[in-house]
Image (cartoon, grey):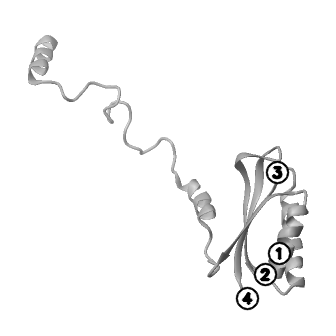
Amino acid sequence: MPLYETVLIARNDVSQAQVETLVENISGILGEHGGTIRKREFWGLRTLAYRIKKNRKGHYVLLGIEAPVEAMNEMSRQMGLHDDVLRLLTLRVDEIDETPSPILSRKDDRGDRGSRGGARSGGRYESGRGGRRHNDSSETRDHNAAAAE
């Protein structure tokens, strides 16, 4: 059977539970036609690049699907008619990657940034920003040294 990856964007007004119910509806549609969902990733509520149907945010879901063409056509038709679905993109792939998508791995890496202070080196004078320039000529250094005495 052909393999597909589908990303759908649901309205931001719906809850996470309603998005999961929407995915279960898709699973039922595919099951009637002999297809299955092999991978589910909920990317959460994300800001859209531009407004879609007066929405600025949407719930993103990635699905890895194994289904015949008729099942995918029926799923696309029904999701296109569904009021809570803003966009649906389906691509045919050679294999479904079981590892987490780059979106999820990037989301998990955000917590590893470290603290804002503490043992971090740098600062206004150690980094060279905002302080005295280091390309002073020897005459200027000699003049400054004499003036300091």
Which residue is depicted at the point 12% across and 24% down? 137
**Which residue bears the numbered disc 4?**
1
Question: Relative to 86, does residue 121 appear above or below in the rendering?
Answer: above
- Foreground mark, 2 or 3, reads 2
Numbered disc 4: secondary structure: loop
Give the mark nearer the N terminus: 4 vs 2. 4
Counting labels gives: 4
> Which quadrant of the structure image shows residue 54?
top right
Question: Between disc 2 and disc 3, whose residue precedes?
Answer: 3
Q: Look at mark 3 in the image and give the residue it sits on.
A: 12
Q: CA distance from mark 1 to mark 3?
A: 25 Å
Which residue shows up at 85% across the image and 77% down it?
A: 27
Q: Earlier in the sequence, mark 1 or mark 4?
A: 4
Q: What's under tag 2, amino acid-wise? A: Val
Q: Where's residue 69, x and y in %?
A: 78, 81
Question: Badge 2: few (under 14), some or many (20 or more) residues near its Cα, within 10 Å?
Answer: some
Residue position for label 2: 69
Amino acid bearing label 1: Asn
Count neighbours of disc 4 (C-alpha within 10 A) and say few if under 14, some if 14 to 19, many if 20 or more: few
Element assignment for label 2:
helix
Residue 55 image position (x, y, % from top left): 80, 46
Does residue 27 sit above or below 62 in this rendering?
Answer: below
Report, in whole angstroms, how far the alpha carbon at label 4 lies from the one at label 2.
9 Å
Q: Are marks 2 and 1 in contact (CB under 8 Å)?
A: yes
Dot 1 corresponds to which residue? 73
